[in-house]
Image (cartoon, rainbow, N blue to C red):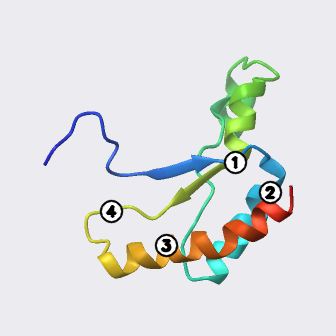
Amino acid sequence: VNNPEENGHITAFTLKDPEKRNWLLKALQAEGVQAREHYRPLHLSPYAQENLAPPSSLPVTEHVSKSLVRLPAHPELTEIQLNKQFQALEKVYSHLIKKE
């Protein structure tokens, strides 16, 4: 079923504290989940810095960039793989909130 309000190619979320993102990525990867960072602000790209006059800072954009976690999402993802992601998140989440 096609739902125009769903984004079917990315599963992502942000953390309140971007300082915890790298720990979470490593923890999920250790559990076999290909979690990644995703968004890099364009105003900080080498091209923008060399060829444009980007703003020196976009605090909200930079915060989102530093706190975003992307999980695998694609049509070939099996139910077993999805369950593995959920189990890994459940396992590492309790350790993540203890870090707060």
Residue in the image at 72% along x and 20% along y = 54
Check whether the beta carbons of the residues at disc 1 and disc 2 lie within 8 A of each other.
Answer: yes
Question: What's the residue type where badge 4 is placed?
Answer: His
Task: Tell me, for residue 74, which label it has, or none.
Answer: 4
Residue in the image at 76% along x and 18% along y = 55
Q: Where is residue 81 in the image (x, y as percent from the top left)?
A: 39, 78
Q: How far apart, in angstroms, are the residues tagged by discs 2 and 4?
A: 26 Å
- Residue designated by label 3: 85
Quarter in which the C terminus is drawn: bottom right
**Residue 20 falls in image quadrant:** bottom right
Q: How far apart, in angstroms, are the residues tagged by discs 1 and 3?
A: 17 Å
First in sequence, mark 2 or 3: give its number: 2
Structural crowding at the residue carrying mark 4, measured as other residues with C-alpha within 10 Å and reported as few (<14), some (14–19) or many (≥20): few
Of circles 4 and 1, the one toward us is 1
- Determine whether 18 is above or below 76 in the image: above
- Residue designated by label 1: 15
- Residue designated by label 2: 20
Question: What's the residue type where badge 1 is placed?
Answer: Leu
